[in-house]
Amino acid sequence: MGCSQDNQNNEQVVDAVVIGAGFSGMYMLYRLREAGLSTRVYEAASGVGGVWYWNRYPGARCDSESLFYNYTFSEELYKEWSWSSRYPEQPEILRYLNFVADKFELRPNIQFNTRVKSAYYDEESSRWNIETDQGEKVSAKYFITGVGCISTANLPDVKGLDRFEGDWYHTGHWPHEKVDFSGKRVGVIGTGSSGIQSIPVIAKEAAHLTVFQRTPQFSVPAKNHPYDPEYLKKAKENYSEIRRQMQESIAGMAFQYRERSILDDTPEERQRVLQEAWEKGGWHILFAYNDLIINEEGNKLVADFVREKIREIVHDPETAETLTPTHYYGTKRAIIDTDYFETYNRENVHLVDVKKAPIEEVTAKGIRTKEGEYELDAIVFATGFDGMTGSLFKIDIRGRDGISLKEKWENGAKTRTYLGLATAGFPNMFMLTGPESPSVLGNMPAAIEQHVDWVMDCIAYLQEKKVEVIEANVKAEDDWSKHCRELADQTLYIKTDSWYTGANIKGKPGGFQIYVGGYGPYRQICDDVAEKGYEGFTLKSV
């Protein structure tokens, strides 16, 4: 593991501890180890993969195109791996991450089946004292979280679940073995991304499927297809250009917004552009114009286009109306699907609007709403995650003066970071894709690589300058948080309840904890901070 033993305290001593062995933790480990730093990675699962280890539900797949949804730090790796299709399913993504772990021999530095219980900063030694659920104690100079933005499953507090006689599952913690729904009456609660992906697959297998929907969602067809070998060959030959475009783009993919306002087009041209984007599938509608997230009038035009598509696809007018969203387009996580709306034309699928008839309880035989009881053999909770801060708050993280991260951020009501990478009062702690970074508003592997590279450049600088402690300044943190809020306030994101704002978690304080300025501009800001000797941080030699 490349660590030493402090015999006096029976404590392992390393340069860095990383939490999580998904995309973030694996690349962070690779860079730390290449720099010669002793590193311990803790992972709760029994294998690598992060969210892709746990999310094994039917239909689970990526919503970024696979040519972009991978590491680009190694040209050799990029050219060795070949994706089968435009939007690969979970098993293929997990195979890719295992391939990476094997290629770079990462497993010896990862301790699986282990959760970090606490991480306390010791001001006297300027080190982090970390304790796991296995009773292990380790001291680290750097404490780095790669816990993910959407990795803590949200299981609603539903009355009576303990007495349900059938089986129940959560999409975020799906069994490793296949779940057979053949001949069963299945209920799915939730129509976010995981619900929209799983519902069509479950419907084909179950005897009957009842979907309990609280909020209808915009979703566009993925138009997934196998990759042509010649197309893959050309992409690999174009590696450098694809990587450059990803790094400079708004959302970490090798395409940009069309540099035009939707209001500049005639109705006929607008219809042509949107129809073309619909036929392409994926995120292309969101990128069809450059002002959909800030232009209320223009957003309505796109939303109306997608609403009309829903009414065209779904045969029953009443069901179509229940499935038609009323919020702005693109202000919740952009969802892509395969035959989602078409599924409601099946005779074995029934939609329940739980806004009109709320779920009152789970009974021994099924689910009772205000309007009646639905007998079920299995329940699937597709209720998403406690986003942005949920995974961080599950760990008892304490900085200076013993103040916990949860206390400092007031349980999420006053989340404050500097660049989404650090927070004042927590020296030598780095958060990969933390709150107030661009993170989930695009292609996560691109955001992860940028953060890991920035952290490693920072650590190299500290070593070169013989700096022992780096800590975000309160003013820099306040200014960054204010800047993030000001940008968000110019958008329609804040006018929509979503997991972006914590609205899916009962009792969670609301707020928009994401930098909306885009991946490319954010990268430049971070680079400028580094070039100015890590402006906004206090650096101390002990």
Image: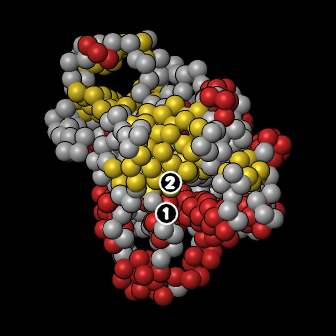
Q: Position of residue 520 (x, y in %)?
A: 70, 65
Residue behind mark 2 = 16
Q: Does the image show residue 445? A: yes
Label 2 sits on a secondary structure element that is: strand
Q: Position of residue 205 (x, y in %)?
A: 22, 43
Q: Position of residue 186 (x, y in %)?
A: 27, 31
Q: Give neighbour class at mark 1: few <14, some 14-19, many 20+ (Cα, 10 Å).
A: some
Q: Residue at x 41, y 77 (%)?
A: 77
Asked whether, in this view, residue 479 is left or right of residue 334, the answer is right
Image coloring type: secondary structure
Asked whether, in this view, residue 65 is left or right of residue 84, the answer is right
For badge 1, the amino acid type reads Leu
Q: Does the image show residue 273? A: no
| Mark 2–mark 1 CB contact (< 8 Å) | yes
Q: Residue at x 44, y 57 (%)?
A: 39
Between residue 183 and residue 294, name the one nearer to us: 294
Q: Residue at x 20, y 18 (%)?
A: 165
Asked whether, in this view, residue 223 is left or right of residue 455, the answer is left
Q: Residue at x 33, y 72 (%)?
A: 103
The mark total stands at: 2
Quarter of image, res 61: bottom left
Residue behind mark 1 = 37
**As drawn, 250 above or below 151:** below
Which quadrant of the rendered structure holds the N terminus? Answer: bottom left
For badge 2, the amino acid type reads Ala
- Disc ID at residue 304: none
Between residue 382 and residue 260, name the one nearer to us: 382
